[in-house]
Amino acid sequence: MAKEFYDISYKAYFNTRLKEVVFQGVETWPLYVQVTYDRKSVFFKSYYFGLFSQPKYDFLKMPLWHVIELEHKAIEFLIAWNADGFSLGRLQQQYKMHSQDLLDSLDRPFKKWLAGYFREQGLPGLSALMEHEPDRVAAIRLWDDLAKCLDADVFARLEMKVTRGEAPPYIHLAMYVRDKLPKGPFCLPLYEWSDDDTKRAIGRSIESRLWRADIGRIEMIVRGLLRSKG
């Protein structure tokens, strides 16, 4: 690391100047991030704190140290990524895009696809639930419950359509995260896709579990998310 980077420091901290908020059913102060370089600092809200404060993620029982760990990893990635030239302004811009959780980005599109699928299957109640209450429950919980309550053959047909690429690749990436991090956090930051070794590891993991998966299509969709958030 170049000497000019020795003065970079960062921390996640609870902003006690603000009102307490509810995180995973517990009141606490909002989490913020501070990055300091050359005696100047920037401060911004923790993306992951806001993300996992959503009621649909309460079931994860996610500890705050997982959130802090996600923030530290994101900042460390961006510092290393800018090894040839660092600025606080550039880091803030890149943070907004590359910290985004791929699973959350695909959550609503996947549920919208499920709504269309159940409509075609003559199940308008399930379709309406998926379409009109998209933010009340995480897609992975819906998927787990469908696996339990649907007839085995019915679920197998649904799973085949999802696996073969008719749906957004939410389940593919969710299964990868569950395999890699069974104890959490249930999160796949977009910046991880910028590392070729990680991207290949994700592809191998998905193919080993869901052998019909179209990895090229998944990569294309993720690149589209990168462009849309740029």
Image (spheres, helix red, strand yellow):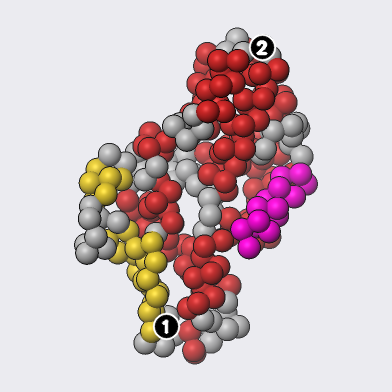
Sequence-earlier tag: 2 or 1: 1
Label 2–label 1 contact, CB within 8 A: no
Q: Is residue 48 above or below residue 155?
A: below
- The amino acid on which the numbered mark 1 sits, given as a three-letter code, is Tyr
Query: Which of 196 and 10 lies nearest the eye of the viewer?
Result: 10
Query: Which of 106 and 215 lies nearest the eye of the viewer?
Result: 106
Q: Residue at x 62, y 25 (%)?
A: 115
Residue bounds of the magenta highlight: 216-230
Image quarter of residue 137: top left
Quarter placement of the C terminus: bottom right
- The amino acid on which the numbered mark 2 sits, given as a three-letter code, is Gly
* Residue 183, horizontal then vertical, whole percent: 42, 41
Q: Is residue 18 above or below residue 113?
A: below
Image quarter of residue 111: top right
Task: Check disc 1 and report the residue beneath it.
Answer: 37
Mark 1, secondary structure of its residue:
strand
> Magenta includes 217?
yes
